[in-house]
Amino acid sequence: QKEVEQNSGPLSVPEGAIASLNCTYSDRGSQSFFWYRQYSGKSPELIMFIYSNGDKEDGRFTAQLNKASQYVSLLIRDSQPSDSATYLCAVNEWVTGGGNKLTFGTGTQLKVEL
Amino acid sequence: DVKVTQSSRYLVKRTGEKVFLECVQDMDHENMFWYRQDPGLGLRLIYFSYDVKMKEKGDIPEGYSVSREKKERFSLILESASTNQTSMYLCASSFRGLNNQPQHFGDGTRLSIL
């Protein structure tokens, strides 16, 4: 069973600060990684994905991947109260016989305080 | 935009009933997934399908079955509903065989078994 670990939080940051969300995974062969945001009572929505070592930036969001350390993170710059949500890390996994699926962490709750 | 539509947002059923949850996607995705989400437990995969008439067990298939007769539709069946199946159920879909394709989620069905 592949594992994806996240600190459940809550992680509290002041408005305007950088929020740093972390995720580790157990399968060294994993190749692609996804970050989803989930507001309370809503379904997960994709923020971004990354599959190469290093950083990938999209607006205020930066995903960082270190395959040697089996570690992926999400940085949110200039955090806003609207960023308050649960952030899910997911890792792609191939399935014997065809198809692929995502293994999700349990999520980190982020609270951005005024 | 990808559209994943779940047939009901809220559903109330009685113990012992046979319950059908329906999911339809409009993006010609090969993969479709059913999850349940409970507080503190994250997203747990029940079943998934990577082709018509194909199905694979996820992490918690007991008490559930699925049907995929058409590519765009994936049904989750609770054979004899029990109170411990009260949960939020999420359907998702994605392309098959591509490493960086995300899953897209429906709005969820909040199911209560009385």
Image (tube, rainbow, N blue to C red):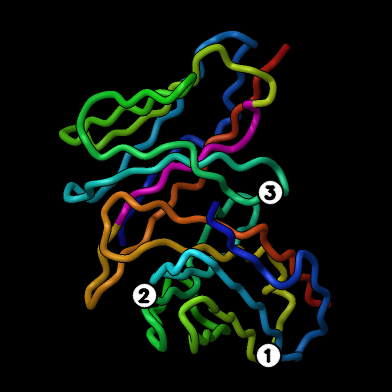
User: Of the residues tagged 1 and 3, which is closer to the observer?
Assistant: 3
Chain holding disc 3: A
Residue at (42% x, 67% y) in the render? B29
Chain holding disc 1: B
Magenta region:
A83-92
Q: Residue A88: percent from the left, percent from the top?
A: 49, 42
Q: Residue B66: percent from the left, percent from the top?
A: 52, 84
Instruction: Look at mark 3 in the image and give the residue it sits on.
Output: A42
The answer to which quarter of the image holds residue A9 is: top right
Does B95 sit above or below residue A76?
Answer: below
The verdict on residue A107 being magenta is no
Residue at (39% x, 71% y) in the render? B30
First in residue order: circle 2 vs circle 1:
2
Q: Secondary structure at mark 3?
A: loop
Amino acid on which the number 2 mark rests in the picture: Tyr
The answer to which quarter of the image holds residue A11 is: top right
Question: Which quarter of the rendering shows the C terminus of chain B?
Answer: bottom right
Instruction: Look at mark 1 in the image and give the residue it sits on.
Output: B80
Amino acid on which the number 1 mark rests in the picture: Ser
Instruction: Look at mark 2 in the image and give the residue it sits on.
Output: B50
User: Of the residues tagged 3 and 2, which is closer to the observer?
Assistant: 2
